[in-house]
Image (spheres, rainbow, N blue to C red):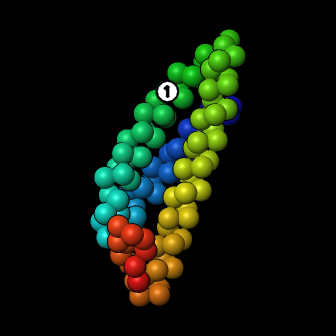
Amino acid sequence: MAEEVLFNIAGDIIKKLGSGVLQQIGLWWGVNDELEKLKSTLTTIQAVLLDAEEKSALNNQVKLWLGKLKEVVYDADDLLDDFSTEALRRQVMGGNKVSKEGWEG
């Protein structure tokens, strides 16, 4: 059951990463490669979750791993939401670039 929830959350994050808005923001801020890596990692996590669901009933290590993975997936979702919110805020304020030293705009 928990695996299904994680699978769905990972899928939601993948959809967000595929949105045109986030892809444009990724290009503006030079983080498009990192967003693509995150998308690839989440796709792999989904595949592993399908297998882990069967094994978690029999293996405590898998249960522990799934608990840690749940935290990471929730953190990734929160981070992506924060990233999107900041991008929209900066767009409204008239700036949309990031320098090596920090935010510009």
Q: Position of residue 2 (x, y in %)?
A: 68, 34
Residue pointed to by mark 1? 48
How many labels, in total?
A: 1
The answer to whether residue 4 is visible is no
The answer to whether residue 81 is visible is yes
Foreground residue among 7 and 38: 38
Q: Position of residue 6 (x, y in %)?
A: 60, 39
Position above or below: 54 against 103: above
Q: Residue at x 62, y 20 (%)?
A: 62
Q: On the rendered image, what quadrant is the N terminus found in?
A: top right
Position above or below: 92 against 59: below
Q: Quadrant of residue 8?
A: top right
Which type of secondary structure does the marked residue at label 1 adopt? helix
Q: Residue at x 62, y 26 (%)?
A: 65
In the shown orientation, is residue 67 left or right of residue 37? right
Q: On the rendered image, what quadrant is the C terminus found in?
A: bottom left
Kindly identify the amino acid type of the residue bearing the numbered disc 1: Val
Q: Position of residue 73 (x, y in %)?
A: 57, 44
Residue furthest to the top: 58
Q: Residue at x 61, y 16 (%)?
A: 55
Q: Position of residue 90 (x, y in %)?
A: 46, 80
In the shown orientation, is residue 50 left or right of residue 2? left
Q: Residue at x 36, y 45 (%)?
A: 37
